[in-house]
Image: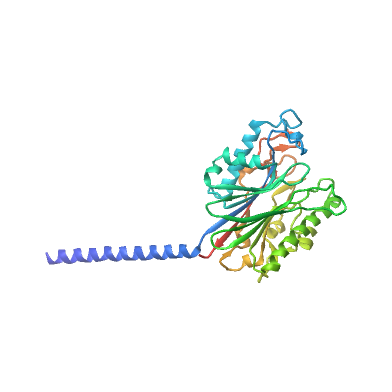
């Protein structure tokens, strides 16, 4: 009887000890998780011509009408919205990103349709958008998850030519907001394309770069520690003059300077990767650039390892003219291709320490 009692005591003690160790490990894990803080996923996506089906007499949008060149209609429009929703969810690892920068959207109404016609509207997303003077009527915009981000103010910067008052392109959108740990500045860009020739349009991208740089410098002059995230379709690579010389966004160095800009897409470009494919060559024209203080282990921070291009198989199709694959786009010329976009999305995670 005594032996049986001793055995039970040993078993109970073992169970208590095991339970204690389990709870201790669980508490350590919970504490470590708490110390990790939160992750805010930032996404940028050129959605390739998100037009509605209504004619805007002030914009050159005629090709995206039901009875015109592309035979754009409501069915194709709603299918496009669904594809954008699928891409956003995939880019957030099937949970919604905090911040979504968008390019090539026609107006506020297509953004409202994106939220109302897909589950995005029920996830807490809100819209920041201002109509730009672009002749084609395409703008940039920012969607934010209101459960995790509070906008404080926003403004736009026009890219203008002093010698040509008729010149018009997409504005640069600047949104300042609170993530819960710190205020962050976001800039959404869509610089002039190379349509008409690379050399002819080169000064236009330099102009956009200088406009953005002036805005960034104004923030650094007030506070050199301003956390800044620049995202966009720059229509130039990280190696081009507009990015390197005018915007002055460089590869990451061992000890980043807080009030300098660093291009997180640089390594991707060096490896020959990209977000858009032109004549069989991948081009890294969609990029995310951050201020140096975000690359230190401050209250909010990131690194080049937290940047990536989303290369999901359903966003790609076989490249019949060249080797490999290419983005599965909505149109190939004027032929409807029933795809997603001619660009791949990019994402970056911002992490907090509390």
**Percent position of residue 75, x then y:** 63, 31
Among all residues in the image, which is located at the extreme left? 1
**Percent position of residue 123, x then y:** 52, 46
Residue at position x 72%, y 39% from top? 320
Q: How many marks?
A: 0
Look at the image and name its color scheme: rainbow
Among all residues in the image, which is located at the extreme bottom? 255
Viewer-nearest residue: 23 or 181: 181
**Percent position of residue 346, x then y:** 64, 52
Among all residues in the image, which is located at the extreme right? 163
Viewer-nearest residue: 254 or 214: 214
The image quadrant of residue 41 is bottom right
The image quadrant of residue 336 is top right
**Percent position of residue 287, x then y:** 69, 55
Q: Is residue 88 left or right of residue 221?
A: left
Viewer-nearest residue: 252 or 128: 128
Q: Is residue 38 left or right of residue 199?
A: left
Q: Is residue 258 left or right of residue 135?
A: left
Among all residues in the image, which is located at the extreme top? 67
Residue at position x 56%, y 47% from top? 125
Quadrant showing the N terminus? bottom left
Q: In this rendering, does residue 269 appear at all? A: yes
Q: In this rendering, does residue 250 appear at all? A: no
């Amino acid at each position: 009887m005594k032996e049986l009692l001793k055995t039970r005591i040993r078993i109970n003690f073992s169970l208590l000890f095991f339970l204690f160790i389990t709870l201790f490990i669980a508490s350590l894990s919970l504490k470590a998780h708490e110390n990790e803080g939160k992750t805010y996923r930032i996404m940028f996506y050129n959605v390739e011509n998100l037009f509605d089906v209504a004619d805007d007499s002030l914009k050159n949008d005629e090709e995206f009408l039901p009875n015109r060149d592309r035979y754009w209609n409501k069915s194709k429009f709603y299918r496009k919205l669904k594809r954008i929703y699928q891409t956003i969810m995939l880019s957030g690892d099937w949970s919604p990103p905090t911040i979504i920068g968008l390019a090539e959207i026609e107006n506020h109404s297509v953004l409202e349709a994106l939220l109302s016609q897909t589950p995005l509207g029920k996830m807490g997303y809100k819209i920041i958008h201002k109509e730009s003077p672009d002749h084609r009527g395409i703008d940039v915009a920012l969607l934010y998850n209101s459960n995790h981000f509070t906008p404080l103010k926003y403004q736009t910067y026009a890219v203008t030519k002093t010698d040509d008052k008729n010149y018009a392109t997409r504005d640069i959108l600047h949104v300042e907001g609170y993530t819960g740990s710190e205020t962050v500045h976001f800039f959404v860009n869509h610089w002039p394309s190379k349509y008409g020739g690379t050399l002819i349009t080169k000064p236009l991208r330099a102009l956009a770069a200088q406009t953005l740089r002036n805005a960034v410098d104004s923030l650094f002059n007030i506070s050199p520690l301003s956390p800044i995230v620049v995202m966009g379709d720059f229509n130039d690579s990280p190696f081009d003059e507009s990015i390197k010389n005018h915007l002055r966004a460089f590869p990451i160095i061992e000890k980043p300077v807080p009030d300098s800009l660093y291009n997180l897409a640089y390594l991707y470009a060096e490896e020959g990767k990209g977000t858009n494919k032109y004549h069989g060559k991948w081009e890294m024209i969609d990029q995310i650039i951050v201020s140096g203080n975000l690359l230190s282990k401050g209250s909010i921070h990131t690194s080049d390892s937290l940047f990536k291009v989303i290369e999901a198989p359903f966003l790609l199709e076989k490249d019949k003219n060249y080797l490999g694959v290419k983005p599965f786009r909505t149109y190939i010329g004027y032929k409807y291709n029933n795809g997603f976009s001619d660009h791949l999305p990019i994402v970056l995670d911002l992490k907090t320490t509390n």
